[in-house]
Amino acid sequence: MRVLVLGMPKSGTTLVYARLAQARGLDPNQPGPTAFFEPEPRAFWPEETTAKALLVDPAGGWGSRVPEPFRGWTVEQALEQGSNFDLPILLLRDPRDRWLSAFFYRWLYVHDPDPSDFQRALRMVQHKEAFPSELSFAALARPRGLPQEDWLADLAVRMDRLRTLENQARAAGWAVLRYEDFRRGNFDALAGRIPSDWVLTPEGEQARNFSHIARTRADGNWRRWWLPEDEALFRPLWQPHLEAWGYESGGAWEFDPQPLLNPAEGSEYMHGLFHHENGPHASWAQRWVRTKRSVKSFFGR
């Protein structure tokens, strides 16, 4: 049985991929010959494949002006590749949480972030952690030099494109799963689609290769980071999608009135991604540890 998990960056694809791989007895830490983590499109997939891919816009092909740092598949590639799978899954997540997580994860070294942009963003995040009400999330997330109206138009294009994919995927027989439902153990979207002997659970051992990815393993974190001025900007763009996916019924967005912003989920998290031990910005201490580990591995000790 070939299984595909597809979603936008930071929508929970790694968690669902890992749990599905484990449910069928595969090790998600060992890509190939049947476990594929963010692969390139292929003409052939092995019979027992479990694959995870991201829906991205690397070349501005959606009409957007902000190419993403993540690698992945376009809408057209996703639909074409999905036809080769017995169970293609489109994963959705509350865009407020997803965007918050994507903002932080963009600073991972493999995305080649600009050091000056990182330092600027880090200072702003640290300021917001100290004074949560003084800085909106929009002020943190808007790319430097991009006019606000162009940025909002770009975000609208991405959400409209995702809705288009969702409609086409449903028509093609894809399963559409919400990340929040999966986290709560609600697998109704997969009912009758997976073998009865698969033991699927939202909990389990964190795959060691992906331990740096998780930030909170929760939902609703946006309520602590966003301000009413963020709602004024983004609600007109996102409310139809939120209601269609069951995240909002049209009422007011509820914010944490006295938010405590944990640096481990903000500035410390992004600092660790940028200065990851395998990246070019690792400290000398990290490089020394990495070198010793490589030497021991080479000599089998």
Image (cartoon, helix red, strand yellow):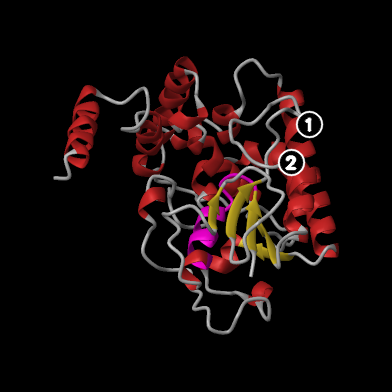
| Residue 264 image position (x, y, % from top left) | 34, 43
Which numbered disc covers residue 244?
A: none
Q: Is residue 288 left or right of residue 187?
A: left
- Disc 2, SS: loop
Rendered position, 61 above or below 257: above
**Residue drawn at (74%, 24%), measured in percent from left and top?**
65
Taking the image as drawn, is residue 170 in sight? yes
Distance from the alpha carbon under mark 2 to that under mark 1: 8 Å
| Residue 45 image position (x, y, % from top left) | 65, 57
Q: Residue furthest bottom?
A: 196
Front-lying residue, 16 or 145: 16
Which numbered disc covers residue 61?
A: 1
Whether the magenta-drawn stretch holds residue 168 is answered as no
Q: Amino acid at mark 2?
A: Thr
Query: Image quadrant for the C terminus?
Result: top left
Taking the image as drawn, is residue 220 in sight? no
| Residue 116 image position (x, y, % from top left) | 46, 15
**Residue drawn at (40%, 34%), measured in percent from left and top?**
273
Residue range corresponding to the magenta coloring: 8-20
Task: Return the residue at label 2.
Answer: 74
- Disc 1, SS: loop
Evaluate if marks 2 and 1 touch, with contact meaning CB atoms under 8 Å apart. yes
Give the crowd class for mark 1: few <14, some 14-19, many >=20 residues within 10 Å. few
| Residue 16 image position (x, y, % from top left) | 54, 61
Rendered position, 153 above or below 19: above
**Residue drawn at (59%, 35%), measured in percent from left and top?**
70
User: Residue 177's image quarter?
Assistant: bottom right
User: Residue 267's image quarter?
Assistant: top left
